[in-house]
Amino acid sequence: MKKWKVVVTDWEYADLRYEEEIFDKEPIELIPMQCRTEEEVIAACRDADGLINQYAPLSRRVIEQLENCKVITRYGVGVNTVDLLAATEKGICVANVPDYCLDEVADHALALLLSWTRKITVANQAVKNGVWDFKVTQPIHRLRGKVLGLVGFGKIPQSLQLKTAPLGLQAIAYDPFFPEELAAQRGVELVSLEELCRRADIISVHAPLTDETKGLLGAEQFEWMKDSALIINTSRGPVIDENALLSALQTGRIAGAALDVVEYEPIQPDNPLLTMENVILTPHVAWYSEQAAAEMRAKAALGVVDVLIHGEYPKYLVNKEVEARIRLQQFQTEQAYGALAR
């Protein structure tokens, strides 16, 4: 029986036990690598049948030199490391894992929201510095009755909206692709980006990073916002123009920011965000729980199995245009994914 070669281009985990658990049941040889450059990816993956990718660049130059590759899966939601057009032209399925951390990211956005509005980090640091005085947190305003603006209304912001509704927040959303009637059923008003910026007291960003969303929130959008506004970002740093954000924070155009992601990661030591008292920062951790990490890695491996072993389009196929170039069965092995509840 043919042994398929699958390369993990790069990874930052203690081991690959979840991937191995999936592949050990199949005629698949797993090759772990730590590629950083295009040249390293080409050398390691030229004859691979499938790839699992984290951060290593899968550019057009790389993809055009993949001789046998049929499927690329990515750890996580974003696919910005992969040239999707090149993969489609080459007949390679690209899959992600869009549903592994829905609660985690929504919970993290809520935690940032509550921490900033209740001045948790300010109060914590004051007490540790020997100051026991509520006045260091002034002013704090009541949360109930505030307007939460959701930039994007996919599954994560939908979850956040459900979690914040009992707190008395009224949600509005900007998402040009979401059906208005479905939003209305959820009690959420769809509005333009300008109206969202003007009305929202708290803006939570949940848009994927694409050519269209890069810099979606820039100088013009910050000019529309209330000077009391808080902006939260748990999606991708470049969705916000960071220079425009810095200017808005430094001039008091907006009140504060709570960021799990920044434009360049890891954050550079001279980034002014690090010295701002009206900014909360976390290190791109919103996605993380032990359960979410295990689910993500197993599902990335299953996407490879879908194609190589079952001859199916992967469950989470991103470049659906590839269906016009290669003929596989429609996905149907749902039971393998259902077994991942941990």
Image (cartoon, helix red, strand yellow):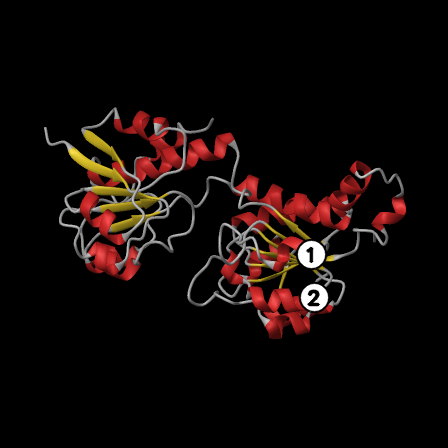
Residue kind at label 2, given as amino acid type:
Gln
* Residue 220 seen in the figure: yes
Residue named by callout 2: 250
The crowding category of the residue bearing disc 2, from other C-alpha atoms within 10 Å (few below 14, some 14 to 19, many at least 20), is some
The quarter of the picture where the N terminus appears is top left
- Image location (x, y in percent) of residue 86: 24, 60
- In the image, taking residue 46 as reference, residue 210 lies left or right, namely right
Front residue (pair 69, 307): 69
* Residue 253 seen in the figure: no
Front residue (pair 92, 287): 287
The residue at 72%/56% (across/down) is 278
The residue at 76%/41% (across/down) is 125
Residue 276 falls in image quadrant: bottom right
Callout 2: SS: helix
**Inter-mark Cα distance, 1 to 2:** 8 Å
- Image location (x, y in percent) of residue 283: 55, 45
- Image location (x, y in percent) of residue 26: 22, 27
> In the rendered view, would you say 123 is above or below 223?
above
The residue at 62%/59% (across/down) is 272
- Image location (x, y in percent) of residue 51: 26, 43
Residue kind at label 1, given as amino acid type:
Met
Residue named by callout 1: 276
- In the image, taking residue 218 as reference, residue 43 lies left or right, namely left
Front residue (pair 71, 276): 276
Callout 1: SS: loop
> In the rendered view, would you say 275 is above or below 331?
below
Q: Earlier in the sequence, mark 1 or mark 2?
A: 2
> In the rendered view, would you say 169 is above or below 28?
below
- In the image, taking residue 202 as reference, residue 210 lies left or right, namely left
Determine whether label 1 and label 2 are within 8 Å by CB: yes
